[in-house]
Image: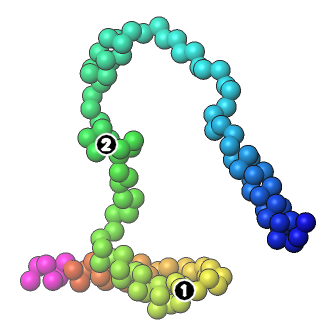
């Protein structure tokens, strides 16, 4: 037997074994679940129709979109972010997290208040 025939036979046997491994059926032999309910279809439909329609159902989602937890305006958030970046508390690298001191937190809060006050004076003009 020459080398080419030996290599071809070895490849054929290895591919045949691989094909057999993937040829198994994808389903398992689990028993089918037995579902029993004491309510009738009409009772379920009546309960569904009697329930108030939630906002989630109108969007086709499982839950309502979350409400924002912050009461700050967009200008306040932007000003506070800029101040935190100026103080070096926000970094784009993956370095350690810096914790703001109480004085720095007050500076950040004051920047947000200034932005809010600046927006109020602009709106009043």
Q: Nearer the viewer, residue 9 or 29?
A: 9
Mark 1 crowdedness (10 Å alpha carbons): few <14, some 14-19, many ≥20: few
Q: Is residue 124 above or below residue 38?
A: below
Q: CA distance from mark 2 to mark 1?
A: 39 Å
Question: Going by the image, does 17 lie left or right of 28?
Answer: right
Question: Going by the image, does 86 lie left or right of 60?
Answer: right
Q: Secondary structure at mark 2?
A: loop
Q: Quadrant of residue 81?
A: bottom left
Q: Secondary structure at mark 1?
A: loop
Quarter of the image with the C terminus is bottom left
Find residue 104 and report its horizontal and vertical position in percent: 51, 84
Question: Going by the image, does 56 lie left or right of 121?
Answer: right
Residue at (66% x, 82% y) in the render: 96
Circle 2 residue: 60
Q: Which residues are magenta?
A: 120-125
Residue at (68% x, 43% y) in the render: 23
Does the magenta run of residues contain 124? yes
Q: Quadrant of residue 51?
A: top left
Mark 2 crowdedness (10 Å alpha carbons): few <14, some 14-19, many ≥20: few
Circle 1 residue: 91
> Residue 23, can we see it?
yes
């Amino acid at each position: 037997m020459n080398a080419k025939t030996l290599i071809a036979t070895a490849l054929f046997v290895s591919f045949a074994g691989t094909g057999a491994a993937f040829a198994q059926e994808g389903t398992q032999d689990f028993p089918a679940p037995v579902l029993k309910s004491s309510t009738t279809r009409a009772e379920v439909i009546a309960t569904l129709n009697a329930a108030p329609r939630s906002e989630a159902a109108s969007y086709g989602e499982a839950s309502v979109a979350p409400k924002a937890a912050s009461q700050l305006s967009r200008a306040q958030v932007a000003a506070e972010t800029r101040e935190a970046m100026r103080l070096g508390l926000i970094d784009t690298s993956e370095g350690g997290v810096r914790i703001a001191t109480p004085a720095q937190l007050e500076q950040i809060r004051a920047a947000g208040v200034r932005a809010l006050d600046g927006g109020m004076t602009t709106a009043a003009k």
